[in-house]
Amino acid sequence: MSKFDQIIGYETIKNELMQICDMLHNKEIYSNLGAKLPNGVLLHGDPGLGKTLMARCFIEECNMETFTIRKNKSEDFVGFITETFKKAKEKSPAVIFLDDMDKFANEDNNHRDAEEYVAVQAGIDDVKDCGVFVLATANDIRKLPWSLTRAGRFDRNIEVCCPSNEDCVKIINHYLRNKKVSDDINVEDIAKMISYSSCAELETILNEAAIAAGYKRKDCIEMSDLVNAVLRMEYNSPDDFTRVPAAELKKIAFHEAGHLVMSDILLPGSVGLASLRTRGRNSVGGFVRRCKNLPSTACKVLVALGGKAAVELNYGVCADGCEKDIDNALDCIRKAISENGTMGFGMVDVANHRFPETSESMNARNEAVVQAELERYMYKAKEIIIMNKEYLNKIVNALVEKETLVASDIKRIRDESKIIYPEVL
């Protein structure tokens, strides 16, 4: 059994690390082919993604004497770095583990010129080709000097990202394996609600669901416990959220349903969660969480306007509270015009395109085009909503009844509705 089996998912990264371990254990096989062991590996990415676990598995799999350098309160940390590299060289073959290397320098110093990093660079150069392998982790690689992270010192810079949807499912199943769960648990739904969360956040959310179930004296964790935990931990949506009158709640439902339906029609399966719960204790209004990226600017603009379109079509009045949606739509349109020339290069100030400022006349001309585009997209959004009014109404009713819809709820309603897909814009 490989030590890397402790890591759930991240198959590509595990394969890279296992390859290096194999080189450390079977040097002759690789040297006969002219292959040289990479000069160090740097694992970097946001906190909580499992970088330290990956490093520990690497160290255990290598089964070599290991020297760890971690920032401490010692007044002579630079001397400690230098001495550790010296000891590792004497004990070769060995591994040096630089844990959270971006924290080696003091916050009040210029990180890139810090003497701690100068000491690390000198140490790496000193042990090169001496049977000492250097492994490091960092949260923010931008704090490290390029001279340290470049090839020759760290030949492999491996970015550890948030788990993919597939990995998220594996991780959730792993964390649930020792918990009592009901038959209504849908791991795919959970993954689509939180697929971009770190491993640590996933574990915390699942533990919060278990705590909630225990407080209610349940025999097992139910799907409702998990949904509530996600809403509370991921979206700051407390159980005692702000309540509104039924008429106002239905209007909010139409707004969120407009966003949901538009997104799901333009990219089926793109919505992982929709709720009438508030984000924060004192706010009003629901939210929609997409689990897939929209494929084009046109789709982004239409989804942004979907809520306003649905409310206006149902109530026959200008929808209020849509400032952020309109701003998002305008930003997308302006970016497409100014950066990509989507309305032709006549709308781009060619002479000044590389500069942040443009002439007053050019700004006025561009804004006129932006306004026309916004009106065109709004017309198209209403057209799509009208074509799929059955789907919209079913989503509204489900939201009012259940308060929160997950991916499987949305798919079931979509499958029961007649969907009319729009022509390509």
Image (cartoon, rainbow, N blue to C red):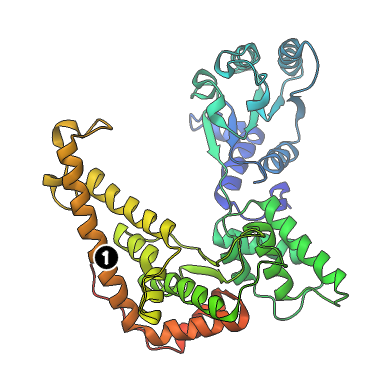
* Residue at position x 37%, y 75% in the image: 317
Left or right of 97 on screen, residue 219: right
Q: Amino acid at mark 1?
A: Tyr
* Residue at position x 38%, y 88% in the image: 418
> Which type of secondary structure does the marked residue at label 1 adopt?
helix
Left or right of 368 on screen, residue 307: right
Location of residue 64 in the rendering, given as x and y in whole percent from the top left corner:
75, 31
Left or right of 198 on screen, residue 175: right
Please name whichever residue, 239 or 135, is drawn nearer the observer in this view of the structure: 239
* Residue at position x 58%, y 50% in the image: 162
Q: Is residue 342 visible?
A: no
**Please, is residue 369 above or below residue 237 in the view?**
above
Location of residue 236 in the rendering, given as x and y in whole percent from the top left corner:
65, 58
Disc 1 packing (10 Å; few <14; some 14–19; many ≥20): many
| Quarter assignment of residue 315 | bottom left
The residue that disc 1 covers is 377
Please name whichever residue, 294 or 13, is drawn nearer the observer in this view of the structure: 294
